[in-house]
Amino acid sequence: MPWEASIAADLAGAREIDVIVPAPERPVVRAPIWIVAVDGDLYVRSWKGEAGRWYRRAHRYGTGSLAMAGREHPVRFVPAAEPGLDARIDQAYLHKYGDSSYAPAMTRPPAAGTTMRVEPAS
């Protein structure tokens, strides 16, 4: 299911969003993250790599929400690991967040190995 164009544009244009990931019988994890758009799809990575608690849950359960400007958007997290795509996602992170000293870390391990496409939940 594709994103509604205006929602995708808002999420892609945001400097930072919150990812919200539940788990059975545990408190919900909420964390600020960066998001980029490549070829009309939205992607996120964990700055802490697999050590990121939100990432571990998103990877394990595959569902959660993205929150921005007081609205939550239910999503599915889909692992994305394609060499050509990864390079374009790297470029998107550097272009969007290049003014931050943290941007290069998002393009190499451990963060680069945690790329997930976020899709609207049906």
Image (cartoon, helix red, strand yellow):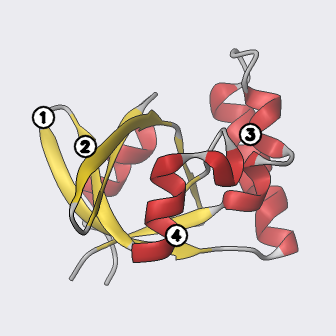
Sequence-wise, the earlier of marks 2 and 4 is 4
Sequence-wise, the earlier of marks 3 and 2 is 2
* Residue 70 place in picture, x, y as percent: 12, 34
Sequence-wise, the earlier of marks 1 and 3 is 1
- Which residue does the image show at 70% across and 48% down from the upper left? 49
Quarter placement of the C terminus: bottom left
Single out the mark in the foreground, 2 or 4. 4
- Which residue does the image show at 25% across and 43% down from the upper left? 67
Q: Nearer the viewer, residue 7 or 52?
A: 52
Report which residue position mark 1 lands on: 70
Single out the mark in the foreground, 3 or 4. 4
- Distance Cα–Cα, label 3 vs label 2: 21 Å
Three-letter code for the amino acid on which mark 2 is drawn: Ala
Q: Report the disc number at residue 67.
A: 2
Question: Mark 2 and 4 residues: CB-CB less than 8 Å, in contact?
Answer: no
Return the residue found at the far left: 70
* Residue 38 place in picture, x, y as percent: 61, 59
Instruction: Determine crowd level at label 3: few under 14, some 14-19, many 20+ residues with C-alpha closer than 10 A.
Output: many
Sequence-wise, the earlier of marks 4 and 1 is 4
Question: Mark 2 and 1 residues: CB-CB less than 8 Å, in contact?
Answer: yes
Question: Mark 3 and 4 residues: CB-CB less than 8 Å, in contact?
Answer: no
Single out the mark in the foreground, 4 or 1. 4
Report which residue position mark 4 lands on: 59
* Residue 117 place in picture, x, y as percent: 53, 68
- Distance Cα–Cα, label 3 vs label 4: 18 Å
Q: Report the disc number at residue 106.
A: 3
- State the SS at label 4: helix
- Distance Cα–Cα, label 2 vs label 4: 18 Å
Three-letter code for the amino acid on which mark 1 is drawn: Gly
Residue 48 lies, with reference to residue 15, above or below; the image says below
